[in-house]
Image: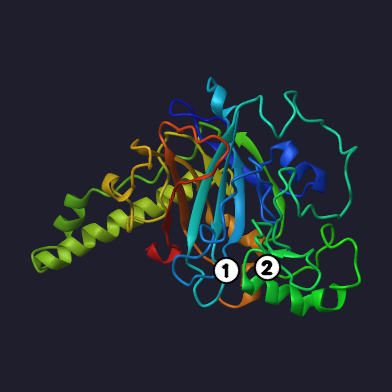
Amino acid sequence: MAAGAAGPAELGFAEEAPAWRLRSEQFPSKVGGRPAWLGLSELPGPGALACARCGRPLAFLLQVYAPLPGRDDAFHRSLFLFCCREPPCCAGLRVFRNQLPRKNEFYSYEPPSETGASDTGGLVCLQLKSGAHLCRVCGCLGPKTCSRCRQAHYCSKEHQTLDWRLGHKQACTESDHLNQTAPDHNFLFPEFEIVTEAEDEITPEAVEMEDYSEVTGSMGRILEEELDSMARHESKEDHIFQKFKSKIALEPEQILRYGRGIKPIWISGENIPQEKDIPDCSCGAKRIFEFQVMPQLLNHLKADRLGRSVDWGVLAVFTCAESCSLGTGYTEEFVWKQDITDTP
């Protein structure tokens, strides 16, 4: 994805794809499944991927491949978004950025193959080239090890318990292929590729904001000042929501809007962040908007199967304006959630 401040947004859509297209060496943008980590060392640890509210492990929601043209140190660059799906919380959100030069220790200098010749079917890669082991449940860093077989790795006690209950208790001492097979733990979101296209600049006309003076004038003198203020507020709310609906009308299936440095579109006038609400990067630079996740993605997630579902109106991701260089490590960026309940 490469939209910038001067151009229209790039729109992302969820599509089925063969498993090989969603692996790290293909530099995918994707929803669900296990993360296709970019840098294969210095992954975020279990503490970084725990919900700040309930403390449970976060689930991988999506990743966006977003290299920066002209930046040798960000020839490869991906953003990884995680969310809490543990009822009754379903609130925590964290996002991480990783970037690599074209010449690096993990990937070929040449572009990846466009075929699935190396496809290994349904096998799951639970150990990275760096030697790091991944959790059998979520695909994140797994520093914990089963004390019996010493082959199964986990990010947390919660995921070790879940895997034990769903089959590892029987397979623990029987299988030599624990690093390649894993049951469906009902924890991962369904997996899709994110395919993109530029937004058509000819969009339906936004609903014009009502002329507040005419509205209030027609109400007569009986309205108190507070009621007048409420009417103005409701009209503004309705305008913002109508503008949101108008903006997505041509492509109602869009799950993501990408445009580094452009402005997000909000679903409501409530809970829109001010500049002071977006923390600076740890390097000292300001953060700028990079992409937003749309509520249409919820239709693909089957999120209600765990009880209370994850939910949002808009998830807006803000990243370091300088995209500061971090070696092979991952740095946390900032995500702002605007709830669907904020709409009029």
Question: Measured along the vertical axis of the image, is residue 236 above or below residue 107?
Answer: below
Count the marks: 2
Question: Measured along the vertical axis of the image, is residue 5 above or below residue 243?
Answer: above
Task: Determine contact: label 1, label 2, CB under 8 Å.
Answer: yes
Query: Which residue corresponds to the image point at 88% horizontal and 44% vertical from the top-left?
Result: 119
Q: Is residue 96 left or right of residue 334?
A: right
x, y percent for residue 72: 56, 22
* Camera-side residue of 11 and 309: 309
* Camera-side residue of 236 and 96: 96
Mark-to-mark CA distance, 1 and 2: 8 Å
Q: Which residue of the protein is positioned furthest toward the top in this rendering?
A: 70
Query: Which residue corresponds to the image point at 63% horizontal and 63% vertical from the top-left?
Result: 155
Query: How many residues crowd around disc 1 within 10 Å: few (fewer than 14), some, or many (20 or more)?
Result: many
Q: Give the secondary structure at mark 2.
A: loop
Which residue lies under the disc numbered 1? 85
Which residue lies under the disc numbered 2? 187
x, y percent for residue 77: 58, 35
